[in-house]
Amino acid sequence: EPEVTQTPSHQVTQMGQEVILRCVPISNHLYFYWYRQILGQKVEFLVSFYNNEISEKSEIFDDQFSVERPDGSNFTLKIRSTKLEDSAMYFCASNPGLNDNEQFFGPGTRLTVL
Amino acid sequence: SQQGEEDPQALSIQEGENATMNCSYKTSINNLQWYRQNSGRGLVHLILIRSNEREKHSGRLRVTLDTSKKSSSLLITASRAADTASYFCATETTSGTYKYIFGTGTRLKVLA
């Protein structure tokens, strides 16, 4: 069964450093997403991506964040200069792009900013 | 209240009992999904219910949806210790990007 994969599973970085979180969505899906979950809190929407551009972003997704689909398979989230409060689990998801379809989530990358 | 609020926030029951969790939301939805998450782990998809459906079953899970009240419930029957986890509802909005809005979650503890 196809699945969304994410690497790395755990990333530790120093405050101020840039990090890139990687995701490989399901191949025939059209919509891609990043969500964030701070420890003990709910999952929050960050950004959706369709047709090689951002289709929607939340207020969390400020200038420090960017997304890219550099080739036909990878979907990346870059945090330019990490802050302590960026420590969270980051989930990638993809969707076929049709109504009423399950959104497929990856296993997550735990980001720890020291 | 926010889109996707669950109650109760925490629930503790004995093995064998039923657990009921509720979710309320504010905007129009295409569907509503329930997820389970073990501490610090990924999201496990449990069940999807579409906006034109009222009830759905999957094994020991029963989900209801009342779009007039903008609410859903998840019932786990004959609970087991392994059901201990956080349970989240997520609504797919009609905004066009199919993004999900997650609820605040219910932390379920099943005591053996």
Image: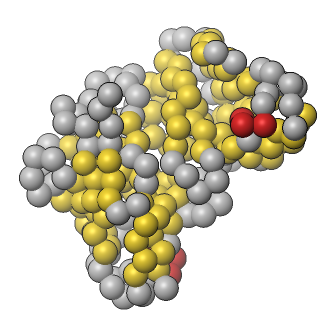
* Residue occupying the point 37% across, 25% down: A101
Compare residues A55 and B39 and report the one nearer the observer. B39
Residue A46 position by quadrant: bottom left
Q: Is residue B35 above or below residue B78?
A: below
Find the residue positioned furthest to the right. B14
Q: Is residue B111 above or below residue A42?
A: above
How many labels were placed on the picture?
A: 0
Residue A105 position by quadrant: top left
- List x then y, in percent, for residue A107: 43, 49
Compare residues A40 and B32 and report the one nearer the observer. A40
- List x then y, in percent, for residue A52: 13, 49
* Residue occupying the point 87% across, 25% down: B17
- Give the color scheme: rainbow, by chain, secondary structure or one colour: secondary structure
Q: Is residue B102 above or below residue A47?
A: above
Find the residue positioned furthest to the left. A71
- List x then y, in percent, for residue A38: 56, 64
Residue A19 position by quadrant: bottom left
The quadrant in which the N terminus of chain A is found is top left
Compare residues B7 and B26 and report the one nearer the observer. B7
Q: Is residue B61 visible?
A: yes
* Residue occupying the point 46% across, 64% down: A110
- List x then y, in percent, for residue B56: 60, 13
* Residue occupying the point 69% across, 44% down: B85
Q: Seen in the image, is B28 located left or right of residue B98?
A: right
Q: Seen in the image, is A80 located left or right of residue B30?
A: left
Q: Is residue B106 visible?
A: no
